[in-house]
Image (tube, rainbow, N blue to C red):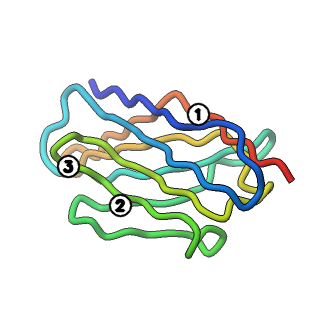
Amino acid sequence: QVQLVESGGGLVQAGGSLTLSCAASGSIFGPSNMGWYRQTPGKQRELVAAASSGGTATYPDSVKGRFTISRDNAKNTVYLHMNSLKPEDTAVYYCNLRLIYTQNYYWGQGTQVTVSS
């Protein structure tokens, strides 16, 4: 099993910054892709940023240029640096890890990010 523990959410004013962290532990064998998703009530969970095992990052247009994903493979930790936050970024943010060899994937418990206008 793999456990993901997120931290760093909170309340911030529009234009501000936050950094989320996600530490993975457990049976992590081989390379993995890690990413961040977010969800608001009544909507589907959407990808915010993804980082491949080789470090390639992917972002949707809605956050490109404002959010940066990074990972520390030695610590099995992934970060999401969020700048120029907007009220529409308000959501619960979830960390995701997908093991390449087994294609099993895991979710964190979620952390609330609230951006006030």
> Looking at the image, which is closer to me, 117 or 31?
117
Q: Is residue 27 above or below residue 20?
A: above
Residue 7 rendering spot, x and y as whole percentages: 49, 33
Disc 3 residue type?
Asn
What SS does tag 1 mark?
strand
What SS does tag 3 mark?
helix
In the displayed structure image, the side of residue 32 where residue 47 appears, left or right: right
Residue 55 rendering spot, x and y as whole percentages: 27, 65
Number of marks drawn: 3
The residue depicted at 56 percent of the width and 57 percent of the height is: 82
Residue under label 2: 51
Q: State which quarter of the image contains the N terminus.
A: top left
What SS does tag 2 mark?
strand
Contact between marks 2 and 3 (CB within 8 A): the answer is no
Counting residues from the N terminus, which is met first, the one under dot 1 or under dot 3? Answer: 3
Q: CA distance from mark 1 to mark 3?
A: 22 Å
- Binning the other alpha carbons within 10 Å of mark 3 as few (below 14), some (14 to 19) or many (20 upward) gives some
1 or 2: mark nearer the eye? 1
Residue under label 3: 73
Residue 78 rendering spot, x and y as whole percentages: 35, 47
- Which quarter of the figure has residue 67? bottom right
Disc 1 residue type?
Thr
Residue under label 1: 111
Counting residues from the N terminus, which is met first, the one under dot 2 or under dot 3? Answer: 2
- Which quarter of the figure has residue 84? bottom right
Disc 2 residue type?
Ala
In the displayed structure image, the side of residue 91 where residue 94 appears, left or right: left
- Binning the other alpha carbons within 10 Å of mark 1 as few (below 14), some (14 to 19) or many (20 upward) gives many
Numbered label attached to residue 63: none
The residue depicted at 13 percent of the width and 46 percent of the height is: 30
